[in-house]
Image (spheres, rainbow, N blue to C red):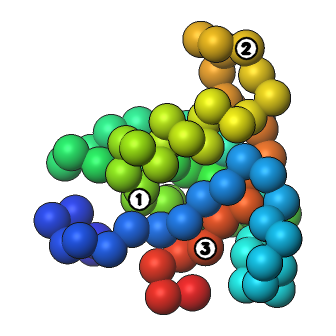
């Protein structure tokens, strides 16, 4: 179980990274929510697995603003690149 009070966070980008490309995975957003004062983004992988990413609200706002969606539109179904903490 994840300790949401621990200061580490996962990484997420709305655009394909140009640095250390081999370290990033790609997935599709299934949900964006909040838990214990953190943003939790659930991403479906190409293998059909689900990955839960924990990011700050500032990172959430940044990557959502960079998605090709209109303001107020749901990010569900959008492709993102991510790295789990330590991954």
Circle 1 Cα neighbour tier, 10 Å, few/some/many (<14 / 14–19 / ≥20): many
**Residue located at (73% from left, 61% from top):** 81
Distance (Cα) linking label 2 and label 3? 25 Å
Q: 52 and 84: which one is in front?
A: 84
Residue 17 is at least partly visible in this image:
yes
Residue 44 is at least partly visible in this image:
no
Distance (Cα) linking label 1 and label 2? 24 Å
Circle 2 Cα neighbour tier, 10 Å, few/some/many (<14 / 14–19 / ≥20): few
Seen as rendered, the residue at the extreme front is 19
Percent coordinates x, y for residue 86 in the rendering: 48, 88
**Residue located at (49% from left, 60% from top):** 53
Distance (Cα) linking label 3 and label 1? 10 Å
Q: Which residue is mark 2?
A: 70
**Residue located at (63% from left, 31% from top):** 65
Percent coordinates x, y for residue 77 in the rendering: 76, 35
Q: Secondary structure at mark 2?
A: loop
Residue 57, picture quadrant: top left
Whether residue 42 sits left or right of residue 34 in the image: it is right
**Residue located at (22% from left, 63% from top):** 4
Percent coordinates x, y for residue 55 in the rendering: 42, 56
């Amino acid at each position: 179980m994840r300790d949401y009070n621990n200061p580490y966070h996962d990484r997420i980008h709305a655009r394909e990274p140009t640095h250390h490309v081999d370290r990033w995975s790609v997935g599709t957003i299934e949900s964006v929510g909040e838990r214990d004062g953190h943003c939790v983004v659930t991403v479906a992988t190409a293998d059909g697995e689900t990955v839960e990413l924990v990011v700050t609200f500032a990172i959430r706002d940044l990557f959502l603003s960079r998605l090709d969606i209109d303001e107020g539109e749901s990010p569900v179904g959008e492709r993102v690149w991510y790295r789990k903490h330590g991954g």
